[in-house]
Protein backbone atom coordinates (compact mmCIF):
# COMPACT_ATOMS: atom_id res chain seq x y z
CA UNK A 1 0.00 0.00 0.00
CA UNK A 2 1.42 3.37 -1.06
CA UNK A 3 0.85 6.23 1.36
CA UNK A 4 0.55 9.54 -0.43
CA UNK A 5 2.00 12.53 1.41
CA UNK A 6 0.19 15.88 1.51
CA UNK A 7 2.91 17.31 -0.74
CA UNK A 8 2.35 14.55 -3.32
CA UNK A 9 -1.41 15.15 -3.16
CA UNK A 10 -0.86 18.84 -3.80
CA UNK A 11 1.39 18.09 -6.78
CA UNK A 12 -1.19 15.68 -8.19
CA UNK A 13 -3.93 18.27 -7.73
CA UNK A 14 -1.79 20.94 -9.43
CA UNK A 15 -1.27 18.58 -12.38
CA UNK A 16 -5.05 18.49 -12.84
CA UNK A 17 -5.26 22.28 -13.22
CA UNK A 18 -5.39 24.03 -16.55
CA UNK A 19 -2.06 25.44 -17.68
CA UNK A 20 -3.18 29.02 -16.98
CA UNK A 21 -4.30 28.02 -13.47
CA UNK A 22 -0.95 26.31 -12.87
CA UNK A 23 0.82 29.54 -13.86
CA UNK A 24 -1.46 31.53 -11.54
CA UNK A 25 -0.69 29.09 -8.73
CA UNK A 26 3.04 29.53 -9.30
CA UNK A 27 2.74 33.32 -9.16
CA UNK A 28 0.65 33.17 -5.99
CA UNK A 29 3.14 30.85 -4.28
CA UNK A 30 6.09 32.99 -5.37
CA UNK A 31 4.39 36.10 -3.95
CA UNK A 32 3.63 34.34 -0.67
CA UNK A 33 7.21 33.09 -0.38
CA UNK A 34 8.57 36.56 -1.09
CA UNK A 35 6.29 38.02 1.57
CA UNK A 36 7.34 35.38 4.13
CA UNK A 37 11.02 36.01 3.40
CA UNK A 38 10.45 39.75 3.78
CA UNK A 39 8.81 39.22 7.19
CA UNK A 40 11.66 36.94 8.31
CA UNK A 41 14.27 39.45 7.14
CA UNK A 42 12.51 42.29 8.94
CA UNK A 43 12.43 40.19 12.12
CA UNK A 44 16.16 39.43 11.81
CA UNK A 45 16.98 43.12 11.29
CA UNK A 46 14.88 44.14 14.30
CA UNK A 47 16.59 41.52 16.47
CA UNK A 48 20.02 42.69 15.33
CA UNK A 49 19.14 46.31 16.05
CA UNK A 50 17.91 45.36 19.51
CA UNK A 51 21.09 43.38 20.23
CA UNK A 52 23.18 46.33 19.09
CA UNK A 53 21.16 48.76 21.23
CA UNK A 54 21.68 46.50 24.26
CA UNK A 55 25.43 46.41 23.63
CA UNK A 56 25.38 42.69 22.80
CA UNK A 57 27.34 43.25 19.60
CA UNK A 58 29.80 45.74 18.26
CA UNK A 59 30.59 47.13 14.84
CA UNK A 60 33.45 45.46 12.97
CA UNK A 61 35.23 46.07 9.70
CA UNK A 62 34.71 43.69 6.79
CA UNK A 63 38.25 42.43 7.35
CA UNK A 64 37.54 41.64 11.01
CA UNK A 65 34.34 39.86 10.04
CA UNK A 66 36.14 37.74 7.44
CA UNK A 67 38.87 36.85 9.95
CA UNK A 68 36.21 35.71 12.43
CA UNK A 69 34.32 33.72 9.83
CA UNK A 70 37.45 31.96 8.54
CA UNK A 71 38.85 31.21 12.01
Image: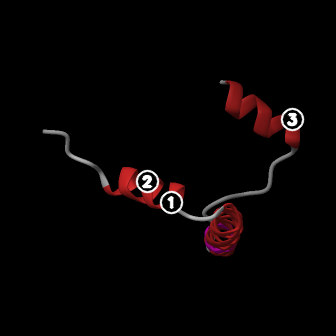
Mark 1 and mark 3: span between their CA atoms?
53 Å
Front residue (pair 8, 67): 8
10 to the left or right of 60: left
Reading the image, the residue beneath label 3 is 63
| Range of residues picked out in magenta | 39-45
> Which numbered tag is attached to residue 12?
2
**Main secondary-structure element of the magenta-colored stretch:** helix
- Tell me the quadrant of the picture where the C terminus can be found: top right
Mark 2 burial class by Cα count in 10 Å: few <14, some 14-19, many 20+:
few
The residue that appears at 36% across and 56% down in the rendered structure is: 9
Is residue 41 one of those drawn in magenta?
Answer: yes
Quadrant in which residue 61 is drawn:
top right
> Mark 3 touching mark 2, by CB under 8 A?
no
62 to the left or right of 8: right
The residue that appears at 76% across and 29% down in the rendered structure is: 67
Mark 3 and mark 2: span between their CA atoms?
50 Å
How far across and how far down the image is residue 11, in percent?
47, 53
Front residue (pair 43, 17): 17
Reading the image, the residue beneath label 1 is 16
Q: Nearer the viewer, mark 1 or mark 2?
A: 1
Front residue (pair 41, 14): 14
Mark 1 and mark 2: span between their CA atoms?
7 Å
**Earlier along the polypeptide chain: callout 3 or callout 2?**
2
How far across and how far down the image is residue 16, in percent?
50, 60
> Mark 1 touching mark 2, by CB under 8 A?
yes
66 to the left or right of 30: right
Amino acid sequence: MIVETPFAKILDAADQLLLEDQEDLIHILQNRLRDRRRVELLKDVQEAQQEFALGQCKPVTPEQLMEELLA
